[in-house]
Amino acid sequence: MEAYVDIINKIRADYVDIFMEERQTSQINMEENKIQKSSVSFDKGIGVRVIRDGKTTYAYTNDLSKSGIEELVAKLIKNEFYEKFLNFKKINGRAFIIKTNPQQVDIKEKLNFVKKANDHVWSLDGRIRQVRVLYADSLQRIKIANSDGFYTEEERIYTLFLVHVTAFEEGVLQTGYEAEGGLKGLELFEEIVPEALAEKAAKRALMMLRARRIKGGRMPVVIAAEAGGTMIHEAIGHGLEADLVQEGLSVYSGKIGQRIASEAITVIDDPTLPNMRGSYVFDDEGTQAQRTVLVDKGILINYLYDRYTAMKEGKKSTGNGRRQSYEHYPIPRMSNTFIAPGNANPEEIVRSVDKGFFVKKMGGGQVNTVNGEFVFEVQEGYLIENGAVTEPVRGAILIGTGQEILQKIDMVGNDLGFSIGTCGKNSQGVPVTDGMPTVRIPEIVVGGQSD
């Protein structure tokens, strides 16, 4: 990194940072009982961001030769060089513990995980029509320096394992999906058993084949902790990212200090949680990761900032400047975002509903951050009758607005479940974790079969 820090000293601007990245990625994809893809890829490059007079310029290159660096600098320099030169101070953080670096493990062992999951699913039921198993790991080494005189570096190791199963019977097609992973190595497979994860996905697809379609309408809904945090990620998370707030593209713009949710709701973003998929020691601008309370007992108290959006308001970054790679400039992004647990017993929450809908597993979702409107698919859901979870139903979607659902939640469980994903925004994808406890929504529109 020392060979590149002089870039910062040569560019006249309000703020400059440089991001150097080396990445090695392994991937195994099995479908139709065949290994469709087994690959290892390498990439390396640097990106330089310049903030001058409130505007951002970004340039990157994978040519790390002297001439490549000089060309990059030439594209960014518009004024005279700085007359003073910075002495960079290295900032260290407490790294997460990785037990087994997957880059040092033979690919045969990784193939074994994939084949075990695949073979087990096909042995379960003749109605299974398609099985996809994906294993992926990546080693990312980053070095960051900025015009504040700070320099840091970090190594991140991610491992991901997912199973997608499709089942078919009498004209009905259903899918089941399970994914596990995080900022961890092959110790992931000390926590999960490939066959068990695969069977969970398969059984969900098979069960939904014979489930009747839900009758839509307004009704009480209980969302289980194991459903994952898709709702919190979409319904409020994106709306609290400072770039959208400042552009007037968030329903939560200008609402700091106001009540936006019920007193039962506290929302936190925390990349310091050990070894989760959205965790990091430093963000992609070199700001140390920190726990940020966004909503405190229903009151909006903060947004998620990167350096640029924080500078615009005279604030400090919350450590949420993230980017997909050196080819992308950083923007405010969530990390591990969740609703904090409450005091209610999850079983009591279910018993409190006489007739309603129970969401055990969320599917995908879409949200309009300007007005907060959302639509969420339910992958696995059941009827609640007389305070008990009864028969499975399919075809359900949850429809509403983020501000409505957050205001209505009146019971929050003392449990907490997480789900993983890759969040897309501005053509960039970053790893995230979303979580929530079991919650009760007294009334929400559940889309389904009409009369």
Image (tube, rainbow, N blue to C red):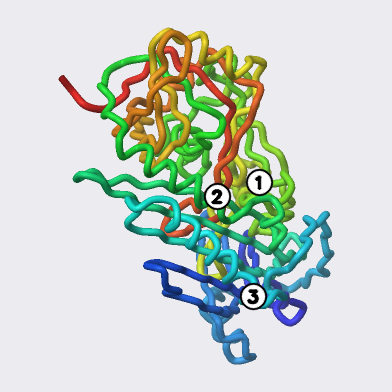
| Residue, disc 2 | 197
**Looking at this rendering, what residue extends furthest in the left direction?**
451
- Lower sequence index among marks 2 and 1: 2
**Above-or-below relation of 377 to 259:** below
Distance between the alpha carbons at the discs numbered 3 and 2: 32 Å
Point out residue 298 in the picture as x, y percentages from the top left corner: 57, 19
On the picture, is 274 further left or further right than 428?
right
Give the structural element (helix, strand or loop) at label 2. Answer: helix
Q: What residue type is labelled 1?
A: Ser
Q: Position of residue 85 (x, y in %)?
A: 78, 72
**Image coords of residue 284 (percent x, y):** 64, 59
- Looking at the rendered structure, the kind of residue marked 2 is Leu
Instruction: Tell me the residue that label 1 is attached to.
Output: 317
Amino acid at the residue labelled 3: Glu
Crowdedness of circle 2 by 10 Å Cα count: few (<14), some, many (20+)? some
Q: Earlier in the sequence, mark 1 or mark 3?
A: 3
Dot 1 surroundings within 10 Å: few (below 14), some, or many (20 or more)?
many
Secondary element at tag 3? strand
Return the mark for residue 125. none
Viewer can see residue 248 = no
Residue 31 visible in this rendered orientation of the protein: yes
- Tag 2 near tag 1, CB within 8 Å: no
Q: Mark 3 points at which residue?
A: 22
Q: Which residue is drawn at 50% across and 57% down?
A: 120
Q: Where is residue 42 in the image (x, y as percent from the top left)?
A: 58, 80
User: Is 53 situated left or right of 363 in this image?
Assistant: right
